[in-house]
Amino acid sequence: MVVVLTVPVADVSVVVPVPVVPVAAVSVVVIVPVVPVVSVVYVPSVAPVVIDVSVAAVSVVASSFLHPTASMATASTAIREKTRDLFIAYISFSSGFQGFDAVRGTEDAGRALVAAHIIGRDLPMSSLSVVEADREPDHKTVVSFDGTTIHYDVYDALSPAVVLIVPGFWRDRRHPSMVHLARLLNTMGYRAVVVDVRGHGDSEGTYGFNLHEHHDVAAVAKDVLSQSSTISRLTLIGFSYGGAIAVSTVARHDLPVSSLLLISPVADFKMIAPRLNPFTIHRHIAFKQALKRPRFTWTVRRAAKLRALDDIENVHVPVCFIHVKNDWLIGHKHSVALYEAAREPKELHVLDIEGNYHADRIFSVAAGSVEPICRDFLGRHTPC
C-alpha cells in the first residue's frame, strides 16, 4: 500500500509516494551520552580538585554539598563524608533499615555506618567448599574487662598453634565465611577460634570501632590459653575493622603472639572513603546480611577510638598485610600506610584482581591468590 504525501514547495505541490511501514518493523535507537568517571569540582579561591571515583554520579552528588568558599582540605573532607552518607543511605533504603529516620536531620544522620560495611555475599570460599562440615564448634563465653560477656567458638584440633579470627564490622562468628575459614584452618592443622566482638552476634555491649574491642579479643585469647597447657603459639587474623582491632590487641596486651595476618585492614577511621558503584554493589552486599545490624553508637564519627596506625609501631611480631588494589570499601592505601609504619619483619601483598573486593570476600573470588599467601605466612611464623 502507498500513501500519497503532498508537500508544498513555493506554490508547487510535489507528490511523493511514501511506503507504509508496519509498526513492528520500526526500531528506535536512543543515543545515550557517555558520562565520564572522573568529575572535576571547582572551588573558588583554590585550585580545581579532581575526584577519582568509580561512578560519576557519586562525585556529582558529593560536589553539590561543598561550600563555595571551602578550602581544598575542607572540600576533600566534605566529599569523603558525603560519599559515605550516600553509601549509608543506599544500605538503609535497600535493607529496610530501621532507626535512620530517628536521627535524620542531625549531623550524624547517615554517618553511623561509615566505618566498614563488611557485609559481603553469602558465598563459600571457593576452595573451602570441599571441606566437610564436621561437628559443631565448642561455644564458649568470657567476661571482658568491663563485665561485658563475649561469645566465641572453638574449632579444636590437636595442635600447639591457635589462630584467633577477628571478623570485621557487621560480621559475626557464625557467618559462613568465618565458619569456612575456621574449618580450612583445621584442615591445615591449626586450632581455630572465632570471636564475636562486642555489639555483634551473641556478645553483649556496643561496638566502638576499636575502642574497647581489643579487651574482648585479649580476654578470649587468655581464656583459650588457660584451657590448654599444650598451646604455645598464637596468631591473630583480622579482617577489615577486625584488622585494626587485632593490631591494637597485640600492641596493648601481653600475649604469646607469634604473628599477625591482616586482610583489608583499617588504618584510620578518617581514611575510610567507599567507592560506590550502583551497577556493581550487588557483588559486595547481601541485603539479608544487612538486616543483621550490630549494636553501635550513632555518634561514632565523633566518639573516641584507637587508630591502628598509631598502635602498629608497638607490634613486635611478623606482620602480613593483604589487600585488593582499589578495594571498593577500604582502599589499599590503608595497608600501605600500616606497612610503612610497621616494624620488620613485615610483608605487603596488594592483589591486582578484578572486582575491587573486600576482606573475606577475597577468598570467594581469588582463593588461588590469597590462600597460598596465608598458608606460606602461617607456615613460616606459626608452624603447627
Image (tube, rainbow, N blue to C red):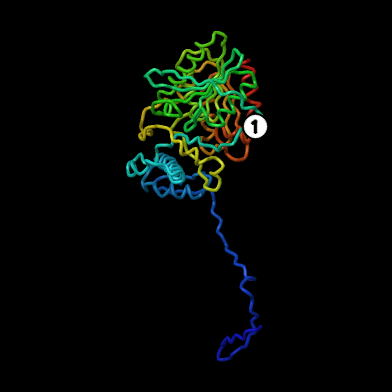
Name the residue nearer the viewer: 336 or 147: 147
As drawn, the residue found furthest toward the top would be 229
Quarter occupied by residue 5 = bottom right
Quarter occupied by residue 107 = top left
| Residue drawn where x is 39% and y is 32% of the image | 296
Name the residue nearer the viewer: 255 or 142: 142
Any part of residue 47 in sight: no
Quadrant of the image containing the N terminus: bottom right
Q: Position of residue 110 (x, y in %)?
A: 39, 41
Q: Position of residue 307 (x, y in %)?
A: 44, 26
| Residue drawn where x is 56% and y is 15% of the image | 258
Please state which amino acid type lies under the numbered disc 1: Ser
Q: Position of residue 318 (x, y in %)?
A: 57, 18
Any part of residue 104 in sight: yes
- Mark 1 — residue? 129
| Residue drawn where x is 57% and y is 34% of the image | 361
Mark 1, secondary structure of its residue: loop
Bin the neighbour count of mark 1 within 10 Å (Cα to Cα): few under 14, some 14-19, many 20 and up: few
Is residue 251 shown above or below 18?
Answer: above
As drawn, the residue found furthest toward the front would be 135
Q: In the drawing, does residue 202 fall left or right of residue 32?
A: left
Q: In the drawing, does residue 268 fall left or right of residue 369?
A: left
Quadrant of the image containing the C terminus: top right
Q: Position of residue 365 (x, y in %)?
A: 62, 36
